[in-house]
Amino acid sequence: MNNNMTDGGAAPSIIIKEADEEQALDIVALGEKIFNNSWNEQMVNTSIYGSYDEVLVAMEGDTLIGYIIYTAPSEDCELLRIAVEEKHRRNGIGQLLIREMIRRCGEKSGENIFLEVRESNDTAMALYEKIGFREISRRKDYYREPKEDAVIMELENITDII
């Protein structure tokens, strides 16, 4: 299903849709720009075609400008990856991707969503807090290059949000 998303400040030409094999290499390329430990094509395709994972992409025309990968195997969902092209950041695209994930998890009887984020990623944590996530714990020295803690965040009762 394609959703033309216009709230949250994103341009009206942004479409959020389920990813397919055509976007896998673009997802990998964007991940390599952003993450120290990016996913390879096999990992992305496993999520695209897997039973529990879902991959959504933000498209501007034929150009992938962002994606979100999450897993929803039960009432507890987990955001695994989210990325937005640098020139499209601070335009609400990340928020649109997260809100669509919340909606879809809620439709599958999801109750809570968890995520982990580098403690130094203030921008991401501010976005998550704006949406309603709260810190519940930390994993000491979880990330490498550079070594730092992971902040574990949770969004509870998502059916109350959607």
Image: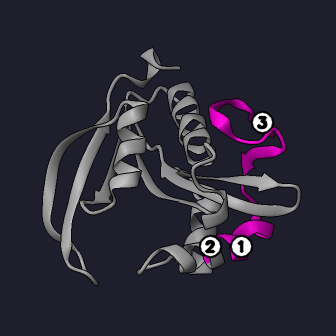
Q: Position of residue 69 (x, y in %)?
A: 54, 56
Q: Position of residue 120 (x, y in %)?
A: 27, 63
The amino acid pointed to by label 3 is Asn
Q: Residue at x 66, y 57 (%)?
A: 88
Q: Which mark is residue 30?
A: 2
Q: Is residue 20 covered in magenta?
A: yes
Colouring rule applied to residues: one colour
The amino acid pointed to by label 2 is Leu
Q: Residue at x 40, y 34 (%)?
A: 130
The answer for how far apart the CA atoms under marks 2 and 3 are is 21 Å
The answer for how far apart the CA atoms under marks 1 and 2 are is 6 Å
Whether 42 is drawn above or below 82: the answer is: below
Q: Earlier in the sequence, mark 2 or mark 3?
A: 3
Q: Earlier in the sequence, mark 3 or mark 1?
A: 3
Range of magenta residues? 1-28
Label 3 with label 1: CB-CB less than 8 Å: no
Under circle 2, the secondary element is: helix
Q: Position of residue 22 (x, y in %)?
A: 80, 68
User: 112 or 132: which is nearer to us?
Assistant: 132
User: 140 or 131: which is nearer to us?
Assistant: 131
Label 1 with label 2: CB-CB less than 8 Å: yes
Q: Is residue 14 covered in magenta?
A: yes
Report which residue position mark 1 lands on: 26
Report which residue position mark 3 lands on: 3
Q: Residues within 10 Å of mark 2 (few under 14, many from 20)?
A: many
Q: Position of residue 48 (x, y in %)?
A: 64, 60
Viewport quadrant of the N terminus: top right
In the picture as drawn, the residue positioned furthest to the top comes out as 160
| Residue 143 visible in this rendered orientation of the protein | yes
The amino acid pointed to by label 1 is Asp
